[in-house]
Image: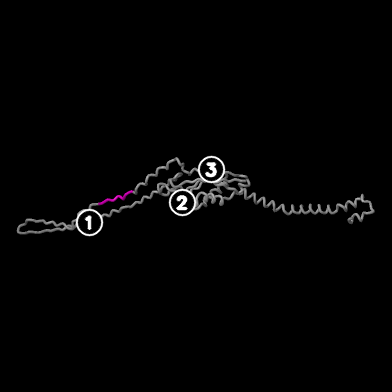
Amino acid sequence: MDLDEITFEKRNKEYGAYWLRKIYKKNITVAFIISFVILIITVGTPFLLASMQERKNVMENTVEAVLADVNRQDEDEPPPPPPPPPPPPALEQQVKFTAPVVVDSVEEKVELAVTEEQVDNTQNEEVREEVVEVKEEKKEVQEEDMQVFTVVEEPPTFPGGEDELLKFIQSNTKYPEIAKENNIQGRVYVQFVINSKGKVGEIKVVRGVDPALDAEAIRVIKNLPDWTPGKQAGRAVKVAFTVPINFKLQ
């Protein structure tokens, strides 16, 4: 017999106080559980929301880079004929002058017949030698090949190959905040030229999506390191390259 039974042994148990005592422990337990759950929700909700937002930001900044096939040479297509060799440098025009024979002195002997008088008159004439210097101008003809190839026998290569190029673009591209706020996404095609020394230049957007995305794509391409230059007929040449950078929100 518990304490409640002893207390209400000779009393009316139908009275409300008896039942309140019987369910007191149950009410206390339920109240404690509800209070604990409310406390957990109140404290844990901010941390949960912050974690979800961070995960969402990581998922949103997804940038895909796919190398375009415009620079791949068709297997069935024969390689283009090598360009004609550059014309040989202009030969120096050399003018040779035959040196005239210079007589140091000319002796003239004039004999006059006079009665019992003979006069030898000798006159020496000096011939001045005039030397004319002919200056030969050397003209160096330096002809720079400005042709930009799209298909070459030996395409330019990025340090480490295409996988490293994709990794570089993905790790260095930042999704512009203004584009994220306006839910702007799409693929930006960037064309650039790798010169005969492997430097990246002449960068331009051939197909853009939004000024913010276009500017970010150009910024990333400008930071590319030097390539191994492409070659045509055994010599390094300029080669055009196109890379699509895909900005996608998830």
Crowd rating for badge 1 (residues with CA inside 10 Å; few <14, some 14–19, many 20+): few
Crowd rating for badge 3 (residues with CA inside 10 Å; few <14, some 14–19, many 20+): few
Crowd rating for badge 2 (residues with CA inside 10 Å; few <14, some 14–19, many 20+): some
As drawn, the residue found furthest toward the left would be: 116
Q: Which residue is mark 2?
A: 228
Q: Is residue 118 visible?
A: yes
Residue 98 circle label:
none
Q: Secondary structure at mark 2?
A: loop
- Residue 29 vs residue 171, the one in the foreground: 29
Horizontal relation, residue 41 to residue 89: left or right: right
Please report contact status of discs 3 and 2: CB closer than 8 Å, yes or no: no
Q: Residue at x 53, y 43 (%)?
A: 207
Q: Residue at x 40, y 43 (%)?
A: 81
- Going by the numbered disc 3, the residue's amino acid type is Arg
Q: Earlier in the sequence, mark 3 or mark 2?
A: 3
Q: Position of residue 31 (x, y in %)?
A: 81, 53
Horizontal relation, residue 29 to residue 83: left or right: right
As drawn, the residue found furthest toward the top would be: 76
Q: Which residue is mark 1?
A: 129
Q: Secondary structure at mark 3?
A: strand
Q: Secondary structure at mark 1?
A: loop
Distance between the alpha carbons at the discs numbered 3 and 1 = 75 Å
Residue 207 circle label:
3
